[in-house]
Image: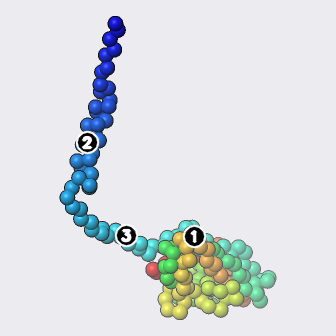
């Protein structure tokens, strides 16, 4: 006669023990439960940054040719990004040669020689771009993606200046 020996499976015993332990710690094993709401928040602050360094190159000014009667116009592009919904103003100061412009409010300089120019908010060059008051450019961000803003420059005609390389440095400020 052959004997068959049946042994209890150790895995089965461990599974039962594990299930019994979990049942003791489940919410149903306790007599009561309490719940409470937990507040979660995050503050999104307004932030703006420059995405590029603007540069305005008027190229060649010809006081004896076309610029004896016509201004020299060029456009620079300013790229910024701000938190969506941010209401900002953008100002541009008068540059490093304040008060030296023979015409206009800004001056390009070559040593002690000056060439007058200005910057505008609009393509027809009627709204002067400054660093205060009505000359500030108003901008409201519609997304946090970079936005491109045009800066319209004009060197005025009929300036009797000698040849040279005339330069200026301006400070652009985002107020938010």
Mark 3: few/some/many CA within 10 Å (<14, 14-19, 20+): few
Vertical side of 174 occupied by 101: above or below: below
Mark 1: few/some/many CA within 10 Å (<14, 14-19, 20+): some
Query: First in sequence: mark 2 or mark 3?
Result: 2
Give the number of the mark in front: 2 or 1: 2
Give the number of the mark in front: 1 or 3: 3
Q: Quadrant of the C terminus?
A: bottom left
Q: Which mark is residue 42?
A: 3
Residue at the image point whose x is 60% and y is 89% from the top: 128
Q: Which residue is mark 2?
A: 20
Q: Which residue is mark 1?
A: 146
Q: Nearer the viewer, residue 96 or 122?
A: 122
Q: Which mark is residue 70?
A: none
Residue 167 location (% of width, % of height): 60, 74
Residue 68 location (% of width, % of height): 76, 87
Residue at the image point whose x is 57% and y is 89% from the top: 105
Instruction: Give the SS element for disc 2.
Output: helix
Spatial CA span between label 2 and label 1: 59 Å
């Amino acid at each position: 006669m052959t004997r068959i020996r049946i042994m209890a499976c150790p895995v089965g015993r461990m599974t039962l023990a594990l299930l019994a332990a979990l049942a003791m710690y489940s919410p149903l094993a306790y007599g009561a439960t309490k719940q409470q709401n937990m507040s979660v928040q995050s503050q999104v602050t307004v932030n703006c940054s420059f995405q590029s360094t603007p540069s305005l190159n008027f190229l060649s000014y010809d006081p004896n040719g076309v610029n004896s009667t016509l201004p020299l116009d060029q456009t620079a592009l300013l790229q910024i990004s701000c938190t969506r919904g941010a209401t900002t103003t953008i100002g541009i100061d008068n540059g490093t040669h304040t008060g030296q412009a023979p015409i206009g409010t800004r001056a390009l300089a070559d040593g002690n020689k000056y060439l007058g120019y200005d910057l505008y908010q609009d393509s027809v060059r009627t709204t002067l771009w400054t660093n205060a008051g009505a000359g500030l450019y108003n901008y409201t961000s519609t997304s946090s993606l970079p936005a491109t803003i045009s800066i319209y420059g004009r060197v005025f005609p009929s300036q009797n200046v000698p040849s040279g390389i005339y330069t200026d440095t301006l400070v652009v400020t985002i107020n938010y």
